[in-house]
Each structure stands twice: as C-alpha cells, then as structure tokens.
Image: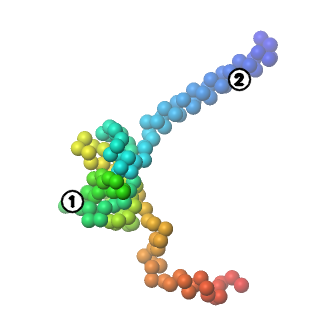
Amino acid sequence: MKPKHQRLVLAVVALVALIGAALLAASALREEASYFYTPATLAKADVEPGKAIRLGGMVQRGSIKRDADGLTVRFVVQDRDATQPVMYKGITPDLFVEGSGVVADGRMNKSGIFVAESLLAKHDENYVPRELKDIDMSTAEHSKDTLAE
C-alpha cells in the first residue's frame, strides 16, 4: 500500500473513532441532563415521574412547613402563573426563606409533588450579608481615608 493510501485510511479511522466518541458522550449526557422548569412550564410539560429535572422559582410566603423529624421540609415554589408543591429531606441552605428564590434538583413523584434532592437558595441584587447589614456603605464610598495612598 502506498504511503498516501495509508494516511487516508488512518485519517478515516481517526474520524470514525472521533464520531463514535462524540456519540457515546452525547448519549451519556442525555441520560444525566436535567432540564430547567418554572412552575408554569412544568404544569404545561408532560414530565414523566422519576425523570431528573430542575425546578426554579420563588418560595411562596407562608408555605414552608417542617415535619416532626426536623429534616423534611414542604413548601411551594411559585412564579407569576403557577405554583408547584415541593418536598425536600435534608438541611436547607441559610438563604432559604419565604419570598426568596430557589432552584431545586429532583424528580416528580406520581402524586404530582416535586421531590427535591438538593436546594440552591438564591438572593437578589440587593443582598447584604448579615455581618455587614448594619454598616453604612454610603459614607465609606465617599471617604478619603484609604489604606492605599
């Protein structure tokens, strides 16, 4: 076989291996991907129970209920158009409060309740840590006293 043909065969084999690896990776990611839904899109979607999804929205005021075991939390996630009941068993994040944003990874059960496996609490752009909420930052911005000269 001529060297030119050897290089062509090698290039074709490499291309087939690359395509095979890409297809294998795509099929593995498809099984592990979790799609993001808001309560309104989740109500319209036909999500089968047990499929991994991600739910995001605001925690409805007055909806957080803790079970007697101290770990199970039930609450409602809402957006403008719909609500979705959620159940989570575990320690909630510090920023998880009524009226705050939340993103939950989990699955729908057969009774229509979203069973969360993890919670991510979100804050708005006006968030200030508890340790700094009593400090007046407006005076510090205009102060000429700095460490750098």
Q: Check disc 2 and give the amino acid type.
A: Ala
Residue 133 screen position, x and y as percent: 45, 79
Q: Quarter of the image holding residue 23?
A: top right
Residue at screen point 33% across, 61% down: 59
Q: Pointer 2: what residue?
A: 11
Does residue 2 appear anywhere in the picture?
yes
Give 96 or 85, whichever is nearer the viewer.
85
Q: Quarter of the image holding residue 120?
A: bottom left
Q: Quarter of the image holding residue 90?
A: bottom left
Residue at screen point 43% across, 62% down: 122
Q: Check disc 1 and give the amino acid type.
A: Asp
Quadrant of the rendering where the N terminus is positioned: top right
Mark 1, secondary structure of its residue: loop
Q: Which mark is residue 79?
A: none
132 relative to 15, above or below? below
Q: Which mark is residue 67?
A: 1
CA gap, disc 1 and disc 2: 62 Å
Residue 129 screen position, x and y as percent: 45, 73
Residue 77 screen position, x and y as percent: 33, 56
Give 35 or 9, whichever is nearer the viewer.
35
143 relative to 41, above or below? below
Residue 61 screen position, x and y as percent: 29, 65
Q: Residues within 10 Å of mark 2 (few under 14, many from 20)?
A: few
**Which mark sits nearer the N-terminus, 1 or 2?**
2
